[in-house]
Image (tube, rainbow, N blue to C red):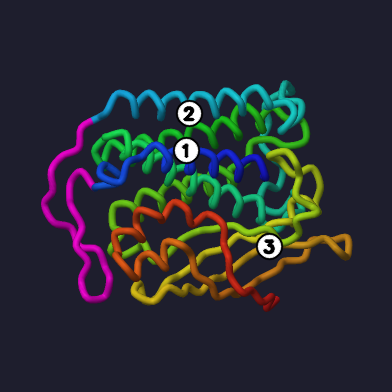
Amino acid sequence: MRWAIALITIAIIGGRLVASPQTDYQPADSSEKADYMGILRPEPATERQIELWRLGVFSATTLSLCGYAYSRMDDWWGHNYGPAHIKHNDWAGDGLVQTDETSHLVITYKITQAGIHFARWTGFSDPVSRCIGAGIAGAIMTWVEYPVDTHNPIQGFGYTDMAANIVGISFAVTRDIWPEYLDYVDFRISVKNADNVNNEIIAQSFAENDAFIYWITVSPVRRFPVHVAAGYSANHDSGIAEREVYIGFGTSIAEIAGMVDPRWRRKLDLWNFYEISVTFRVD
């Protein structure tokens, strides 16, 4: 999990460093104008053009990260050469009380979002950018389930994991199509116990899996830089899985910048991966 966060963060930072302010995100099919509530409304705009050097950076970054993940496959997921099989009692049999499915949803959502962002930065139109982002996330997360988990003797193909992947991709694409209705909702992640975070991408114990909280955040008033959040995690302190539910109140760089210009809220939206808030456990 730590490597997943690190790789996404590196990709985001790299893209922001090489993007110039003049040619940074502009929707291909519409420009943006904020109304009195801070909601971005579409207006006609000029079409973008693909820049070859950006296409090269985007392609090289994507291939490099995928190649690195493939090279670490056995270290991250273990032996993956057994007979194909479906995970037994997929919904509850792993003892993780659905934190695994939740992590799939959040990670797939952020990969899709990053892919859309970089494709748009490269110069692709909005519809093509969404297809590219969804395609990258879908290919990566499907590969994790098949053939990797499918041929892992202690894992197996997880249909609930795949369902969570589809939800994550679908929401990222839908949110990008209708930001005026959905950009106040986001999925994020935070670390609950840093001592239990695994150095590798896949948790090897219940404690490592329980080290994270997965959040859905809602910003009720876009002009006001505060959001409310509901979080989900688990613990195995008593030897059996126990669900944890959290509520939180926080802000972000994007929300603060949106007070000055709502367009900056969108430009910085991809940075809102890690949830920073005052949190309370309620269950």
Q: Quick check: 249 above or below 163?
A: below
Q: Residue at x 33, y 25 (%)?
A: 53
Which secondary structure class fits the magenta region best?
loop
Report the number of discs.
3
- Marks 3 and 2, Cα distance to the nearest angstrom? 32 Å
Check residue 186 for magenta coloring: no
Q: Secondary structure at mark 2?
A: helix
Quadrant where the C terminus sits is: bottom right
- Marks 3 and 1, Cα distance to the nearest angstrom? 30 Å
From the viewer's side, name the closer residue of 33 and 189.
33
Q: Earlier in the sequence, mark 3 or mark 1?
A: 1
Q: Residues within 10 Å of mark 2 (few under 14, many from 20)?
A: some
Task: Say which quarter of the image contains residue 75.
Answer: top right
Q: Is residue 275 left or right of residue 240?
A: left
Q: Quick check: 221 above or below 134?
A: below
Q: Amino acid at mark 3?
A: Ser
Q: Earlier in the sequence, mark 1 or mark 2?
A: 1
Query: Label 2: which residue?
Result: 61
Q: Secondary structure at mark 3?
A: strand
Q: Which residues are magenta?
A: 27-49
Query: Label 3: which residue?
Result: 233
Q: Is residue 219 left or right of residue 131?
A: right
Q: Position of residue 226 (x, y in %)?
A: 46, 74
Query: Label 1: which residue?
Result: 14
Asked whether the residues under the numbered discs 1 and 2 touch, taking CB atoms below 8 Å apart as contact, a structural biologist would say yes
- Marks 1 and 2, Cα distance to the nearest angstrom? 9 Å
Task: Name, please, the residue furthest toward the right.
Answer: 239
Q: Residue at x 66, y 71 (%)?
A: 245
Q: Amino acid at mark 1?
A: Gly
Q: Secondary structure at mark 1?
A: helix
Q: Position of residue 190 (x, y in %)?
A: 63, 59
